[in-house]
Amino acid sequence: MDAAIVEALTAGRPEAAFEALVGAYRRRVFGLAYSILRERAAAEDVAQEVFVKLWKSLDSYDGRARLSTWIYAITRNAAISAHRARRPASSLSDPGTLAEAEGASAVEDRVGADDERLWRAVGALPEAQRRAVTLYYQDERPVEEVAEMLGMPANTVKTHLHRARARLAKELGAAELHGEDAA
Amino acid sequence: MNSPGEQRLEHRLRRLHAGLDAAPGFEARLAARIAALGAPAASPAQQRARADALRRECEAALRGRLWNTLGAALALALGAVLMAQLFGATLAQQLQVLLGSAYSPALSLGTCIAVVGAGAFLAYRSWSGPAPRLLPA
């Protein structure tokens, strides 16, 4: 995937390279931005900004670093900047931000009433755990890829996922998790 | 092996996050923004690639012109030899008569061939038109 994009770039075909890049990274860039911002509209704005920035700076990519690493770094920086600009010195663990996350979940069409409590519980996770959960479950990605997206070691991601699952299980309670199994 | 409760949580988390994607029309909106920006500046590597491609095109065009010119020169030379074979003696005699005995027949014939050759070359140049542009204006 990346090889074809880089080949198109070095062959002097930036339009073809960019088209392939958007197709390959749209969900990843959006998912990473969403995992940080926890709001669809803001995540989409950041994703647009990221791709515009990538288009402008395609010429500066020299192929020494992995393309994915470069894209994820740009996305993380853009999303974190947007998060800070939106609500300085806030965290999604804060009550106010959590309320926003809960409000955002209410407009998610795909979230049914059964999953509302889980959605809120995910929103209430510590930031690092929530980001790992979002990226891991968005496309059932390997832990290594989630680690690259978040810019942290794979073992750290595994720890975040383990703690997040334990916390969610505790939050939701055995009865809800087991559903029919417990009945 | 995960317990049924853990498996259920995994399943619910996957279902919850599966639809996480940009809104429809993301690419179209991005394309509109990109179109407003124009093409990015080429990197040194891209400039080198384009220059190499242009150089290869120029070399191919020059090779074509070279073979064309060599073919024309060969045809002219053959024509001149043929003319000399057919009309050389007669032409030399007439030239000697015109110019007097000051010039040798061989020199007269050479002058004649050079004049005919130059005329044929000028005719060929005017027939073949101007040389094609190798670089864009």
Image (tube, coloured by chain):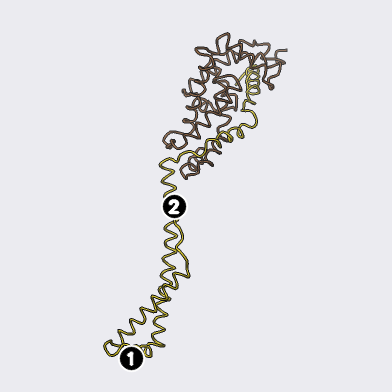
Chain B rendering hue: yellow
**x 44%, y 59%: residue:** B60
Question: Quadrant location of residue B58?
Answer: bottom left
**x 38%, y 90%: residue:** B90
**Disc number at residue B97?**
1
- Residue at the limit of the structure toward the left, as seen here: B102
First in sequence, mark 2 or 1: give its number: 2
**x 48%, y 70%: residue:** B127
Q: On the rendered structure, is B99 left or right of A147?
A: left
- Tell me where residue A22 appears, x and y as whole percent: 56, 35
Q: Chain of mark 1?
A: B
Which amino acid does the dot numbered 2 rest on?
Leu
Q: Which chain is brown?
A: A
Q: Please identify, in this view, whether the residue under mark 2 or under mark 1 is nearer the observer.
A: 1
- Tell me where residue B81 appears, x and y as whole percent: 39, 82
**Disc number at residue B54?**
2
The quadrant of the rendering that contains the N terminus of chain B is top right
Which amino acid does the dot numbered 1 rest on?
Val
Q: Crowding near pointer 1: few (<14 within 10 Å), some, many (20+)?
A: few
A24 and A165: which is toward the camera? A24
